[in-house]
Image: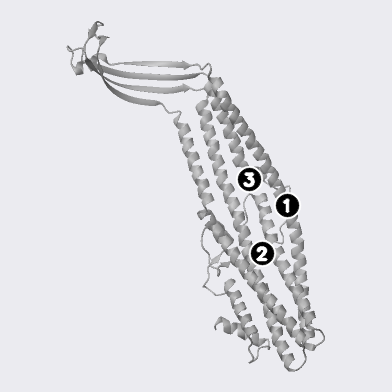
Amino acid sequence: MHLSEIVLSNLKTDGYLNMNFTKILEKAIKLILFLFAILGEQSGQAQQWTLTSCVNQAINNHPDIKSAQLDLGISMARVDQAKSNFYPELAASVFQSGNFGRSIDRFTNAYIDQFYNTTYAGVRLNVPVFTSFRNSNLLASAKSTKAASESGIEKNKNILTLTVITYYLNALSQAENIRNAVNQWKNDSIQYQRLLIRKEAGLTTKTEEIQLLNQMKTDEIGVQDAQLNYETAIIDLAQTMNTSLPSSIRLASLDPDENYYFDIQNTITASLPQINEIKMGIQSLHQTIKATKALSYPSLSLSADYGTFYASSNPERTFTQQLNDTRNGSISLGLNIPILRGLQNRPQVQELKVRQMALQNTMDKTQLGIRQEIDMANTRFKTYKKRYENARYLLDLAKENILLITEQLTAGTVTMVDFLLAQNNMEKAAAALTNSKYQLILQEKILKFYSQGKYDLD
């Protein structure tokens, strides 16, 4: 059966549909069809997205995560660079030179005044033996920076996850608002059909008809506003996921955890990624300061070289014979004691210390912000939990009241004003329930994050 036939059949079962189709009823049917389309009631035609799939899509596609991952790649390269400071240096060299003017012959130690060429070949090895722990501190600093980058990725993932959760819940809320608005419009349409029947029997007035038509037009605008809000929410969600989403997308529903209780003492703020990132940054700067100070301390290095040469000023020996005659090597241990290097290092150390204090101040502000967010989320959670319970109770009363008012309106014991008042009360109760429901879910997920260290996506 076609969807429009189903809707018409439902209206017929209420007994209020007759051969006199009005434009108002046609609009009502269109709005109901639109509601089904928005909420994905076409079986198998709209893809369903869960909160988990939306978060995963955002993490895989969002540029902020990719930027954080690139920063991690740079940090890993710097770790490898710091490790290379421990490696020995080995170099092979070959030189060819021409000599002219007066010089001392390398073989006879006599003065000669002629042009001759020289070929030199050798290998040199240099090993850092002791650098006052500069290389060790540089490596430790690079590893701390890498750990900070890893925490930065997790921090960005958590920020993006909360953004997706917020937009996802907003989309669910707006879809529910559409449902509420269309139900209001449907109720108006049904009452208008009843009014037409009563009008033919002379049991109603023009004033009641105008009042109902005015309410129907107001509710129609409410449906349009709800539609716009829903489509805007889907666009926000799609942009966060860095993908495109149709307005007919089906979002898996979420409900509050009515048994959830938050223990404010059971939080893990000290191990959150945003805290670890700053901690590792402070630690990296501390190790960089130590590495910079090490430049002012003595260093010890071991070097060895082995080489040979040929000079054309000695025609008595061939090229090969000279290479064999002149081959020699040496090993040396050198101690370098910087005297005035501390004057050069002092400004750099001062700058690093200021940066360290700035990071510590950022840490203090971050911890303060987290405490405020926890307190705010806990206060909102308690408030929305009470509002959610009250809104459910009020909506039940409003539904019961609208049924009684409808019966009395049919019997002619109350006026259209009474019906419209009852319907407005039900509309307010439904809106309050929807708002408190999804705000409650959001605060639950924020508090669970500070209790568990990760967002609950179920």
Q: Identify residue type, mark 1.
A: Met
Q: Is residue 60 above or below residue 80?
A: below
From the viewer's side, name the closer residue of 347 and 451. 347
- 253 relative to 334 in the view: left or right: right
Quadrant where the C terminus is found in the figure? bottom right
Q: Is residue 317 above or below residue 421?
A: above
Q: Which mark is residue 246?
A: none
Most extreme residue toward the bottom is: 201
* Quadrant in which residue 238 is drawn: bottom right
Q: Identify residue type, mark 2.
A: Asp
Q: Residue at x 50, y 27 (%)?
A: 135
**Residue at image mark 1:** 376
> Mark 1 or mark 3, which is nearer the start of the sequence?
3
* Quadrant in which residue 344 is drawn: top right
> Mark 2 or mark 1, which is nearer the start of the sequence?
2
Q: Which mark is residue 255?
A: 2
- 44 relative to 306 in the view: left or right: right
Q: Nearer the viewer, mark 1 or mark 2?
A: 1
- Residue 349 spot, x, y in % from top left: 58, 27
- Residue 198 spot, x, y in % from top left: 74, 91
**Residue at image mark 3:** 272
Q: Are marks 3 and 2 in contact (CB under 8 Å)?
A: no
Q: Is label 3 in a helix, a strand or a loop?
A: loop
From the viewer's side, name the closer residue of 378 and 235. 235
- Residue 157 spot, x, y in % from top left: 57, 51
Q: Is label 2 in a helix, a strand or a loop?
A: loop
Can residue 263 be spotted in the picture? no
